[in-house]
Amino acid sequence: MPTTKGTLSEVVYTLPMKLYLSAAHSFRINWQRLIRQVGLWVLLFLSAVYLLWPWLPGTGTTPTHTVVVYGFSILGEVMNEGIFPAFQAEWMAKTGERVEFISSFAGSGTITNQIILGVPAEVAILSLELDADRLVEEGVLPGQTWRELPHAGVLNRTPFVIQVRPSNPLAITDFSDLTRPGVGIVHPDPLTSGGAQWAILAEYGSALRQTADEDQAIAQLSGIWHNVVAQSSSARGARTQFDNGFGDALITYEQEPLRDQALGRLHGDIVYPSATIMSEHIVVVLDKNIPTIDRELVQAFVDFLWSDTAQKIFVAHGFRSVDDAFNAANPNFGLITDPFTVADLGGWPTAKQTIIDGIWKGKVLTELGK
C-alpha cells in the first residue's frame, strides 16, 4: 500500500506551524526594510540640520559672507597671504562673522575686460587708472567713483626697475643701456597688461626727464622695443618667462624682485634707473554687483585697504605705501634719483593719446612691422 506523508494529527499540527513560520519570515523582511527606511530618513534629517545649522536660532554661529575681489597679476600673493587673512581676523573680532574671499588675478587689461563682460567682481584693484576709465566708458561704473576713496583711489605704488642676470654680465645701469645691440629684453604685453603700459611711460619718460628732448625719448623707446625678445599677457607672466631663461633683462615692477629677494628665490640683480615712473594702483568698487546684505561688509573691506594694518602689509610685501611714513620699514626699497608719476606726463588721457597710442603704437610698432 502507498505510504502517507504523515498522520492526520501530524498534518493538523504542522500546517499551522508552517503558516506561522511563513508569516514570521515575511514580518522579518518588512522589519529590515523599515530599519533601512528609518536610517535613510535619519541621514536626510542630519544632512538638512548640517546645511541649515548656521541659520538655526541658538546655534551660536552665523553664515559665512563672501567678498569677490579681482586684481592685477602681482597682487595675488600679498592679498592671499596678507590682506585677506588680516581682514578676516578683524571682521571676526568685530562682528563674530566669518568672511571668505573669492579672488582672481591676471593682467589689468584682462580683468578689466572680464568685468566689462559681466564677472561678479565687487571690488577690483587695477594697475592703472586708464582701466578704471574704461569701466566708466562701458557703463560698468557711473563715473570716476574711485576718486571719492582715500588718496583718490590710489592704493599703493611701485617704481619700474630692470632685473638682470646674476652679477649683471652686460653691465646694464639704466634704460639707455637696453637699447644696445644684442641685449634681449622680456616685456609684458601693453595690449593686456597695465604694467606694460607703465613700463612704456618709464622707458619714454626717463629719457625725456634727462634730456628734455622728445626725439631722444622716442629713440630710447624705439631702441628698447627693437630688443624685446619675449612678451607675456601680464607682468607676472613676463617674470616667469625671464625666470625660465628668456632674455638678458626684464622691465618690471620693483615689488616683484623685492618679494623674490625676501623669499630667497631671486636669481638676478635689481638695477634702479636714475629716472623712472612710480606706478599707482587704483581701487574701484562695483556697487551693482554687491548684494544689499553685504554692502556694509564690502565697505569695511575697502576702508581696511587704507588702514595702517593693510598699508604695513603692502610694504612688507614690497609695495610702497601711499603713506611715506611706512616705507622706511622696508630697507630694501632702492633709491631713485628722479622718480616721476603719470601726472608729470600730463595724466593718463594725455599719456595714452600721445605716448601709448601716438608714439608706441603709431611709430614704434610701425617700425617693427607690427
Image (cartoon, rainbow, N blue to C red):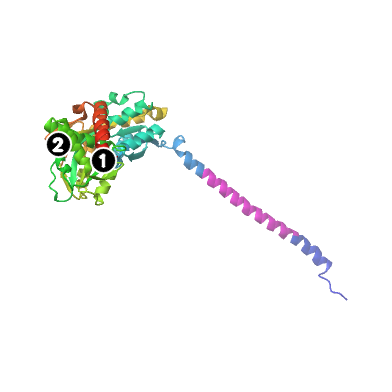
Residue 58: x and y in percent read: 44, 35
Q: Secondary structure at mark 2?
A: helix
Q: Nearer the viewer, residue 217 or 21?
A: 217
Q: Nearer the viewer, residue 255 or 338?
A: 338
> What's the magenta region?
19-46
User: Majority secondary structure of the magenta segment?
Assistant: helix
Pointers 1 and 2 in contact (C-beta within 8 Å): no
Report if residue 27 lies within the magenta region: yes
Q: Is residue 344 above or below residue 109?
A: above
Residue located at (18% from left, 27% from top): 344
What whole-number distance in Å separates the C-alpha atoms at marks 1 and 2? 43 Å
Residue 214 sits in quarter: top left
**Would residue 335 appear left or right of 295 to someone viewing this image?**
left
Q: Is residue 2 above or below residue 360?
A: below
Q: Which quadrant does the C terminus fall into? A: top left
In the picture, the disc for residue 328 is 2
Residue 85 sits in quarter: top left
Residue located at (23% from left, 31% from top): 355
Q: Secondary structure at mark 1?
A: loop
Q: Which residue is mark 1?
A: 368
Residue 40: x and y in percent read: 56, 48
Q: Is residue 167 above or below residue 19?
A: above
Residue 78: x and y in percent read: 27, 40
**Would residue 223 appear left or right of 16 to someone viewing this image?**
left
